Image (cartoon, rainbow, N blue to C red):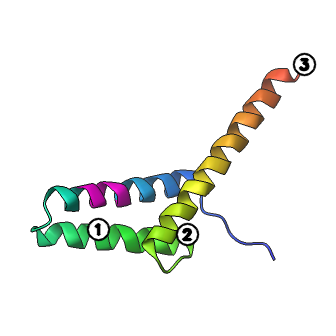
Amino acid sequence: MKMLVPHAKSVAAALRAYRYAQAGLLRDPADPLRYRWLDDAAYTLCVLMGQRNAADAATQAERLLTVSSARAAHQARQAQTVVP
C-alpha cells in the first residue's frame, strides 16, 4: 500500500516550530502561552506525520528528513556524473 509522504520542507518547518516551542517552554514554564504554542506545534506535526504522539511524530519527521537529505545528495552526485 502506497502512503502519502509530506514534502520535506513542510516537515522541516513543522519540526523546527515544534522544537522552538519546546525550547520556549523550557525557558519560561510559567507562561501559559508557551503551552499553547507547544500544543499547536505538536498538533501540526502529528497531523503532518500521521501520528498520535508528538514524540513519535518528531522521530518520524527526523527519519524522513534524513532519508530525504540522503536521497537529494545521491541525486546531486548522479547529476554530476552525467556526461552531456
Q: Residue at x 48, y 63 (%)?
A: 58
Inspect the image, locate mark 2, and give the three-letter code of the amino acid beneath it.
Met
Q: Is residue 84 above or below residue 22?
A: above
In the rendered view, tell whether residue 72 sits above or below residue 50: above
Which residue, as the protein is rendered here, is positioned at the far left? Answer: 30
| Quarter of the rendering containing residue 5 | bottom right
What kind of element bears circle 1? Answer: helix
- Tag 1 residue: 38
| Magenta residues, dominant SS class | helix
Identity of the residue drawn at 49% across and 75% down: 47
* Mark seen at residue 49: 2
Q: Residue furthest bottom?
A: 52
**Disc 2 to disc 1, C-alpha distance:** 16 Å
Front residue of this view, candidates 12 and 54: 54
Horizontally, is 5 left or right of 48 in the view?
A: right
Q: Secondary structure at mark 2?
A: helix
Mark on residue 58? Answer: none
User: Which residue is located at x 70 percent, y 35 percent?
Assistant: 73
The residue nearer to you, when weighing 45 against 10, is 45
Earlier residue among tags 3 and 2: 2
Callout 3: SS: loop
> Where residue 25 appears, x then y in whole percent?
21, 62
Find out whether residue 22 is within the magenta segment: yes
Amino acid type shown at disc 3? Val
Q: In the rendered structure, which segment of residues is drawn in magenta?
A: 18-23
Q: Disc 3 marks which residue?
A: 83
**Position of residue 46 measured from the top left corner of the image (x, y, whole percent):** 47, 73
* Residue type indicated by callout 1: Leu
Is residue 84 among what the camera can see?
no
